[in-house]
Amino acid sequence: MKNSGQIPGIAGQVVAFPRGGAQQVGFERAELMRILDLYGRMVAAGEWRDYAMSFDRNAATFAAFRRAAERPQARLEKRPALRSRQGMWTLFGEHGQVLKRGHDLANVLAPMERRLLKAVD
């Protein structure tokens, strides 16, 4: 009998997925679309010129810069480990101060939306 591509002794066995979860935290498509939509409007208003994203085991970070050589003017962090506490979203200001925390991305981005409205007027 010829081997039909199956490994001997493995046929019919269930192989479990490795434990430990994801290797890095990332943004979902809808989250990224919302963040980049705000970024595009801030660029059009002349407030931001550059951005950076960082992904690691604990957090995904989006940072927006007025100039590339500066500290980020705003930094948005997604930390799923804080989901059941104060919320997984945190918005930091230019000097590292926490501007807003929460469970909903739209509410956390609200201070930047208000800033955009002031910049346009």
Image: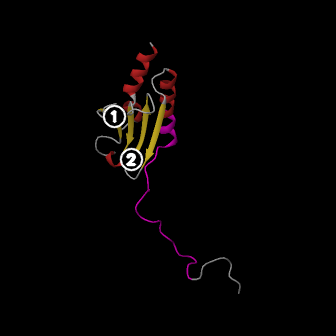
Asked if residue 115 lies left or right of residue 29, the reply is: left
Q: Which residue is mark 2?
A: 59
- In the figure, 85 relative to 4: above or below? above
The part of the image, by quadrant, that contains residue 65 is top left
**Residue located farthest toward the top when viewing the structure as drawn:** 121
Q: Residues within 10 Å of mark 2 (few under 14, many from 20)?
A: some
Please name the residue shown 30% across and 35% down the image: 96
Image x and y of residue 55, in percent: 44, 47
Q: Residues within 10 Å of mark 1 (few under 14, many from 20)?
A: some
Task: State which quarter of the image contains the C terminus.
Answer: top left
Query: Secondary structure of the magenta portion, mostly?
Result: loop
Q: Is residue 44 magenta?
A: no
Q: Is residue 12 magenta?
A: yes
Q: Which residue is mark 1?
A: 92
Please name the residue shown 36% across and 45% down the image: 79
Provide the residue span drawn in magenta: 9-34
Amino acid marked by disc 1:
Phe
Image x and y of residue 63, in percent: 42, 36
Amino acid marked by disc 2:
Ala
Please name the residue shown 43% across and 52% down the image: 24
The part of the image, by quadrant, that contains residue 10 is bottom right
